[in-house]
Image (spheres, grey):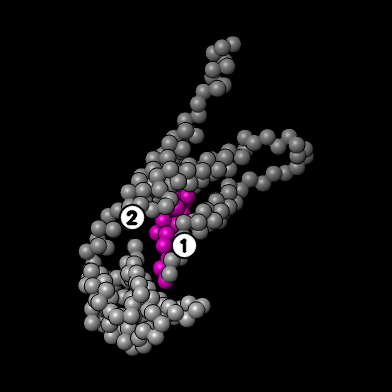
Amino acid sequence: MIRLFAERHLIDWDLVWPVLAAMTAGGLIGVERTYHGHPAGFRTHILVCVTSCLLMLAAMQQANWSFDWLPAQRVVIDPTRMAHGLLTGIGFLCAGVIFREGFSVHGLTTAASLWVTSAIGVLFGVGMLELALIGSGATLAVLAVLRLLDAKLPHVGVMDVLLRWRNGAAPTEGAVRELLRARGLKAVRIGHVISPDGQIHEHVLKVKGPMPINVDALVADLQRRDGLAGFSVLPRDE
């Protein structure tokens, strides 16, 4: 009797290994995100990958579900519906890590990593081990290896610059552009904000220039400007 009970309750390793593999893949991707200080990191990526894997495993095992409450009914099993629901639902989580600050939009790469992590979990759940491993390796290569390559490629840097001028001291847009041009920078967008009492005029700028941008020299120039009540220079993160 005891032996029969044990045989009926043996662990189904065909269900265990996909979950363990999903935890490993999600953890490796999450480590890279955590190391670089992004909002969705180690545990978040593990949970996304494992959740996708568990739900797909459940969808693949629908033949074992009990439908006794549907007598004489024909039940159509379609695991792809679960995959569609997962990849749609993960969009809400991805939207939570994307935020706008000034002209900058942050979190796009982290959102994309969550999306691909969910897809990897789906692949583990349906038993496509080889494709899941290829996807995990490709994702880690893009996030970690290509980051090093990207740092060595010539590219244009972007900064958000805020200039707060005292009443009557705000220069024209042309003068602001000339100030930046002297440092090899270009203002691609200029916004104007005036305080309700009219005492402060703000220039909100999106600035581009070849990397590396000499931020210290620009800050030194701004500190010497008469009429400038305050300023901020925020280089955009990748």
Q: Which tag is nearer the camera, tag 1 or tag 2? A: 1
In this view, the residue in front, 176 or 188, is 176
Q: Position of residue 76 (x, y in %)?
A: 67, 46
Q: Secondary structure at mark 1?
A: strand
Q: Position of residue 133 (x, y in %)?
A: 37, 46
Check residue 87 in the rendering and tell me which mark sits there, or answer none: none
Which residue appears at 70% of the width and 37% of the height? 67
Please report the bounds of the magenta region as a residue range: 103-119
Q: Quadrant of residue 110?
A: bottom left
**Residue where numbered disc 2 is placed:** 143
Q: In the rendered view, tell whether residue 7 sits above or below residue 181.
A: above
Which residue appears at 32% of the width and 69% of the height? 233
Q: Position of residue 100 (x, y in %)?
A: 46, 65
Q: Secondary structure at mark 2?
A: helix
Which residue appears at 37% of the width and 73% of the height? 162
Q: Position of residue 8 (x, y in %)?
A: 57, 21
Task: Decide if residue 220 is in sight here.
Answer: yes
Question: What amino acid is found at the position of numbered circle 2 in the picture?
Answer: Leu
**Residue where numbered disc 1 is placed:** 99
Cβ atoms under marks 1 and 2 closer than 8 Å: no
Question: What amino acid is found at the position of numbered circle 1 in the picture?
Answer: Phe
Q: Locate residue 79 relative to residue 39 in the image: left or right.
A: right
